[in-house]
Structure formats: structure tokens, C-alpha cells
Image (tube, helix red, strand yellow):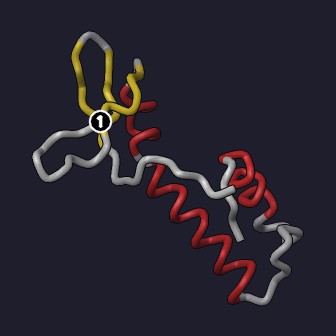
Amino acid sequence: MKTTHTPGPWHYVDCGEGLHAIHDQPDKRGRHEQLATVYTKDNARLIAAAPELLAALEELVLRCDGEEGVRADGSNIQTMRAHAILEKIGGEHE
């Protein structure tokens, strides 16, 4: 099952009163979807970076398991945790 999350990049907006909104990329008309509301700037920054973090993790696993000739079943000690995180996200990652 491949994940179908909202494509990035995402960004956060300080809404005041300790609230931060996570938005997707504006469309051609400048409209965007609010994806989440969080209470701390640190959480907002982390969530907004999620699509880029996912892409970097997928690339790292592909490189370590594929190009380096290490087993692609996740048994590589360096990528076991990365495989577990990708599985937790719910996508199909090779």
C-alpha cells in the first residue's frame, strides 16, 4: 500500500495565541489547504518538514540497500530503523 499524503512542500504559519497552522503549497489561485493546527513552533516546523524528511529517508534507504549492495530486506543494521519508520508511515517502500 503506497501512501497518498498531501504532496509537499508544506509550511507553517504563526496564527497567534500559541497556535501554528500547517499548510500545503498554494494552488494557481493562491489557495491552500490547512493540514493541521499545533501549539508549538517546534512541532509546526517538524510537521511542515515531513514530506522532505520522508523523501530523504526513502532516498537514504534506497541508496544504502540498493546501490551499496546490502540486502534490501531491511536486515542491514544501518537501515533497520529507517525501514521500521517507513513501515509505520504505512507506505510501500523498497
User: What amino acid does circle 1 point to?
Assistant: Glu
Which residue in the rendered view is the most extreme toward the top?
A: 17
In-front residue for pair 9/77 = 9
Q: Position of residue 78 (x, y in %)?
A: 78, 68
The image quarter containing residue 77 is: bottom right
In-front residue for pair 22/80 = 22
Picture residue at 22% right of the left edge, 15% below the top: 16
Q: Is residue 75 left or right of residue 13?
A: right
Q: Which residue is mark 1?
A: 33
Picture residue at 40% right of the left edge, 18% below the top: 39
Near mark 1 (Cα within 10 A), the count class, few <14, some 14-19 or many ≥20, is: some
Picture residue at 69% right of the left edge, 48% below the top: 90
The image quarter containing residue 1 is: bottom right
Q: Is residue 10 left or right of residue 79?
A: left
Picture residue at 57% right of the left edge, 72% below the top: 59
Q: Position of residue 25 (x, y in %)?
A: 26, 48
Q: Position of residue 68 (x, y in %)?
A: 73, 88
Q: Is residue 39 above or below residue 62?
A: above
The quadrant in which the C terminus is found is: bottom right
Q: How many marks?
A: 1
Q: Position of residue 62 (x, y in %)?
A: 66, 76
Q: Secondary structure at mark 1?
A: loop
